[in-house]
Amino acid sequence: MKLPEITSFLKSANAGASELTFDIGFATKDTFDKVVAAAAITPETIGRLYSIAPSSVRVFAYEPALIIKVTIPRVVRSGGIAERDFDGTQQYAPLLDLEIAI
């Protein structure tokens, strides 16, 4: 199943000028628990999707909000001359094809 089929929301945003954060939200605790147990959203998985070192990826599962939060370094600083997404709001797209076996 693809990630958007089991989430209630999936978004990205700047986390300062040099990092991006992704919020992956779930409607039910059962779905959240299954995704966490499947260990499909890991630094290694995100590193592959974004072509970055897994050691630079932070993944947090926050049960009270039923959210998995991921933080990665930005390839280009927000507001830099090479910037194409100033707010970081379009950076979640690679997650749309992530397969989750639950």
Image: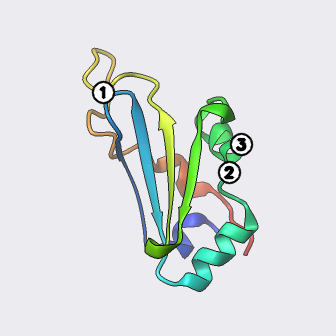
Mark 3 burial class by Cα count in 10 Å: few <14, some 14-19, many 20+: some
Q: 77 or 5: which is nearer to us?
A: 77
| Residue 97 found in image quarter | bottom right
Mark 1 burial class by Cα count in 10 Å: few <14, some 14-19, many 20+: many
53 to 60, vertically: above or below: above
Task: Answer with mark 3 or mark 1, whichever residue precedes in sequence.
Answer: 3
Which disc is residue 78 wearing?
1
How far separated are the C-alphas under marks 1 and 2?
25 Å
Residue 87 at x, y percent in the picture: 27, 39
How far separated are the C-alphas under marks 3 and 1?
24 Å
Q: Is residue 87 left or right of residue 37?
A: left
Q: Secondary structure at mark 2?
A: loop
Tell me whether circle 3 and circle 1 mark residues in contact (CB < 8 Å). no
Mark 2 burial class by Cα count in 10 Å: few <14, some 14-19, many 20+: some
Residue 3 at x, y percent in the picture: 58, 65
Task: Residue at 28% x, 18% y: name it.
Answer: 80
Q: Quadrant of the C terminus?
A: bottom right
Residue picked out by circle 3: 44
**Which amino acid is tagged 3?**
Glu
Task: Residue at 62% x, 66% y: name it.
Answer: 2
Residue picked out by circle 2: 42
Task: Answer with mark 1 or mark 2, whichever residue precedes in sequence.
Answer: 2
**Which amino acid is tagged 1?**
Ser
How far separated are the C-alphas under marks 2 and 3?
5 Å
Which disc is residue 16 wearing?
none
Task: Residue at 61% x, 85% y: name it.
Answer: 30
Tell me whether circle 2 and circle 3 mark residues in contact (CB < 8 Å). yes
**Which amino acid is tagged 2?**
Thr
